[in-house]
Amino acid sequence: MIRLAVPNKGRIAVPILDLLEKSGLHVPESGSERRLITKTLDPHVEILFARPVDIPEYVATGAADLGITGHDMVVERGSDVSELLDLKIGKATLVLAVQDDSRIRAIRDLRDAKIATEFPAIARDFFSRNDVPVSIVRVGGACEATPLLGIADAIVDLTSSGTTLRTNGLRVIADVLETSTFLIANTASLEEKREKIDEIMLALESVVRARGQCYLMMNVRRSSLEAVKKVLPGLSGPTVMDVASTQDLVAVHAVVSEERVYALINALRRAGAKDILVMGIQRMIR
């Protein structure tokens, strides 16, 4: 049995459940209240719902074989786990920020200052490496308000776009840590249950790889094939197959980036393609 710990709430909880669904590890609905531990469609995999910050320790101690949580949580807890796969969900940066009208311009200007953060271990390490003594003020939320309230001189907090910081009149003076959501593993489980863990990792990786890709199918007169192939990008070049038709057609299939489809359609039609179909991809395995 493999126990996989996933967030029970927070900004990455819903995308992670969607990832599990697409990978085939469907989590059945069990009434209005979710159980702490629940089965999946795979009889050898069960899900443990936990706070994101607790997941690294659950995995490190063997309460769970695998976990999905942020890299920032792993670093903050200092947990002895293996990071297997970047799931590319919840990408963000842990930053050092001050009020926009502050005279503070660099890290060294914060000597003996108060720093508010939900990540005290990461913050202490950051300032220690920069040889700047500070006092850490641990907060559980609304970190952006602490400079305005006079609780702290600066904050160390997560941001993905910077909008929240700007809205609260804050200015970034340094990046502390880049983070994303990772599949992590217990080191002992990785040895003892490697085959099943590899199976789960492949399922998740196939969904990650399929993001932003779509499948193009079209019919092309054989005389126009070379022109179409010049227009059409693909992972390993397009697949070309004969079509049972009196018009000497071939079917051309290719995987392309979604962001290129808009421009590609007209270019393909001008090159001689017709009957073009665009389909989403749920999983992609190399």
Image: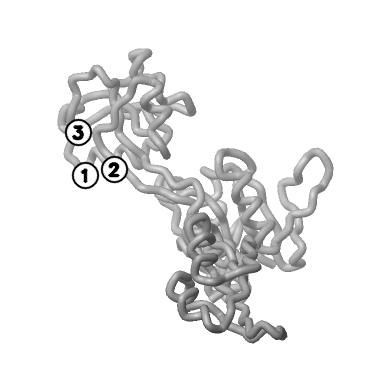
Which residue is most to the top? Answer: 149
Which is more foreground, mark 2 or mark 3?
3
Task: Name the side, left or right, on which 26 lies relative to 14.
Answer: right
Mark 2 neighbour class, 10 Å CA radius: few under 14, some 14 to 19, many 20 or more: few
Task: Name the side, left or right, on which 79 lies relative to 62.
Answer: left
Indicate the amino acid at tag 1. Answer: Arg
Residue annotated with mark 2: 125
Indicate the amino acid at tag 2. Answer: Asp
Residue positioned 51% across, 55% down in the render: 262
The residues bearing labels 2 and 3 have C-alpha atoms spaced at a distance of 13 Å
Work out whether residue 17 can be spotted.
yes
Does 230 appear above or below 169? below
Dot placed on the residue nearer the N-terminal end, 2 or 3: 3
Could you say which is closer to the camera, residue 62 or residue 282? 282
Residue positioned 59% across, 67% down in the render: 216
Residue annotated with mark 1: 129
Residue annotated with mark 3: 107
Q: Identify the image's colour scheme: rainbow, by chain, secondary structure or one colour.
A: one colour
Say the numbered circle drawn on residue 71: none
